[in-house]
Amino acid sequence: GPAASAPLLANLNPEQLAAVTLPAGHALILAGAGSGKTRVLTTRIAWLLQTGQVSPGGILAVTFTNKAAKEMQARLQAMLPVNTRGMWIGTFHGLCNRLLRAHYKLVNLPQSFQILDTQDMLSAIKRLMKEHKVDDERFPAKQVQYFISGAKEDGNRPTDIQPRGEDDRKKVELYALYEAQCQREGVVDFGELMLRSYELLRDHAPVREHYQQRFRHILVDEFQDTNRLQYAWLKQLAGPNASVLAVGDDDQSIYAFRGANVGNMADFVREFDVKHQIKLEQNYRSFSNILDSANHLISHNSRRLGKNLRTDQGPGEPVRVYEATSDFAEAQWIVEEIRQLVRDGTDRKEIACLYRSNAQSRVIETALFNAAVPYRVYGGLRFFERAEIKHALAYLRLLENPSDDTSFLRVVNFPPRGIGARSLEQLQDAAREMGCSLHDAVSSIKGKAGTNLGAFVALVDVVREQSQGQPLRAIIEQVLDASGLLIHYRAEREGADRVENLEELVNAAESFVSIEGFGRDANGMDARPSQSPASQGLDLSQPVLDQPLDEPPAFDAETGETQSPLVAFLTHAALEAGDNQAQAGQDAVQLMTVHASKGLEFDCVFIGGMEEGLFPHENSMSDRDGLEEERRLMYVAITRARKRLYLSHSQTRMLHGQTRYHVKSRFFEELPENTLKWITPKQSAFGAYAPRAGAGGSGSGWGGGSGSFGMGAAPQPVVQQKAAPSHGLRAGLQVFHNKFGEGTVLSVEGAGEEARAQVNFPRHGVKWLALSVAKLTVV
Ligand code: ATP
Ligand code: MG
């Protein structure tokens, strides 16, 4: 009864209370960030259950992520002693999956049907097109995929589409063939989950009526990001006795690029004849400096439904803004601030680093890793664990070690080159019999399989040959090109992110080279001073890191042989992927894209890369719609913060392996100046942006050679000595080594103790030699 529900309702404001205790009927809550929409939705479920108006089985709640669904279940369990299992709480895809499993016979699927992700779907389409000998120049597979997914989102089967022109007719035909193939194989893609369960409800009155009877209360969070098909699906489920509660915020609509339709809110009000509309105007999440910033920013958008947000909390800390000289310095600053926050008692899980694009995480990950700060990348994989990065690393490993069978298997048919499972079985059998690596067994395979396998081996061998004497960056670029990885992902509908990540790998190599001391030119100067910890204004006499970056390169005492930069880099990648991984439940800093942060909140939020072209993203800057969506994204990002907000941008950034100048984001102009506190970087103007004299050195190319890497401020003028290379070696010279004999110098880098040379010895192959140890004489 009412008495029992008192504690449940105790802390609600009048509008929230009204929303939680609404009588039956459809309702819309339109309210800004942090106003308690999700809390209202959850509390309403608890209240409905507690007051006996509905049983758990009568509840259907749609959340935006699986994480949100779990959280909602946990909160309900905490509020009430109910069994949440009977409730249907989940994402659209999760709930559709549940429906299809329950009615697999009716929808003509095997009970154990499998779900294809976007990548699987594309592979399936390619296979189909090959089988039917479709010209993939004229009909690129991802275009076909785009067509099919779009059709499903519009609720159309092949027979529903009126083809416009010959090409369209072909695509419709492929759509039909693809459907047949999926049916044969018992698989469904994401669009199919949604469409088929929609059709189930539409075409089977008894099923529809069953669920309409069952679900008395349908509650939808983040309603602004539903698409047409999802909306139509909801309409099927909502029976005459159901009450639909939709909550949303038009200012947080950030999925228009995937078909989300804010117009669904207006349609909902009209088509459901919504009786109750409630606005929540009190923000409970953020201090007013943060909230004012968000309000001020979003007021620059023109098409808004109009809402206000206020807070009773005081101003709190000002929003801190940092201007860095490089992306590396920016990451260093973020990590320093994070460590300070943790020292002051903030839990790491209450600190979030948000970024606009996935690839931006890499620099921050490295800085956190080096400082031994546990972190977790949420809603995505850590950089070195992403599939495309692992593919690229596998090629690199094969350059170093042709008999790395794991790497071999990972990429032998990726990108696809017609090597099937049967050929691979044959190859593995042969290798087992001969007791050799897969690589070495290839020559024993005959026929078409042998030809294709041979072509793969030749590809890797050629890259290995060509990469001798090349800087790490060039090797990686060559691998990305020659392997076909870049072309492959560029052609993919949702491959843009993966391409960015691959390009980011080039950056990773570039900064690895300079941080690890691989990047000094022959003058002994850092190729990229702004990226070395020593140039960040830190005391050079003290260890700058809690832990050494890595073991110092090991020398073979006898020969002076040392690790190649490629091996060192691969080791680094493997360590960073495996170690220091925050354990489940461990207190860790949260890293995620702004998109993935929707609905979440943290005490402290960092938003990095606030630069034109990054945020707002360059793809969205040309038209007003795009820009307004970027602004909504920024609004989402800002409003994640409870107590502290940190914004940063960098004057220069590594993109595609090159340092670029960046202008700070226009969004800074749209924030109220009185809430911001600009942090003056601890640096003098000395040396800033002055092209470094003597750049280039011997032309070894390890990050040197290009004047652009000399940019970046020297925060505290570090006296740099221009020692001439004492070893007197340069590329092209013939040298003699006690053990390896005569060889040709391919490249030289570093100076003094750290000078190294890459030498090709005809009888022993290419070696990296530490010149302080190895005895080389010029012949
Ligand atoms: P978003 O738009 O970001 O999804 P939201 O509108 O869903 O935000 P909630 O996440 O539900 O907002 O609430 C924001 C924060 O404010 C939460 O920590 C919530 O517990 C708290 N909160 C909401 N209402 C109240 C209240 N009446 N009293 C105290 N705290 C509240
Ligand atoms: Mg919410």
Image: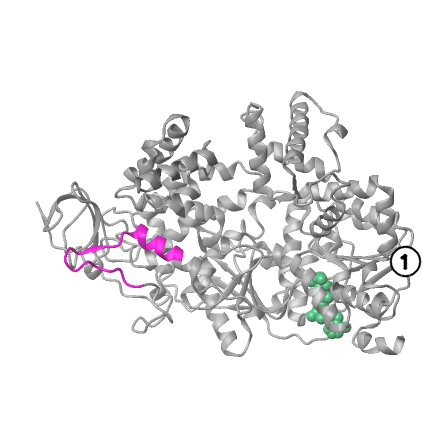
Q: Quadrant of the C terminus?
A: top left
* Residue 714, position as x, y percentages in the image: 35, 63
Left or right position of 241 against 651: right
Q: Which residue carries the number 1 mark?
A: 25
Left or right position of 249 against 467: right
Q: Secondary structure at mark 1?
A: loop
Q: Residue at x 67, y 35 (%)?
A: 183
Q: Amino acid at mark 1?
A: Gly
Q: Residue at x 35, y 62 (%)?
A: 532
* Residue 265, position as x, y percentages in the image: 80, 51
Determine whether 497 is above or below 718 in the image: above
Instruction: Pick whichever, 419 or 118, lies toward us.
Output: 419
* Residue 257, position as x, y percentages in the image: 66, 44
Q: Is residue 586 visible?
A: yes
Q: Which residues are magenta?
A: 551-574
Q: Residue at x 19, y 60 (%)?
A: 752
Left or right position of 362 against 126: left
Instruction: Pick whichever, 750 or 377, lies toward us.
Output: 377
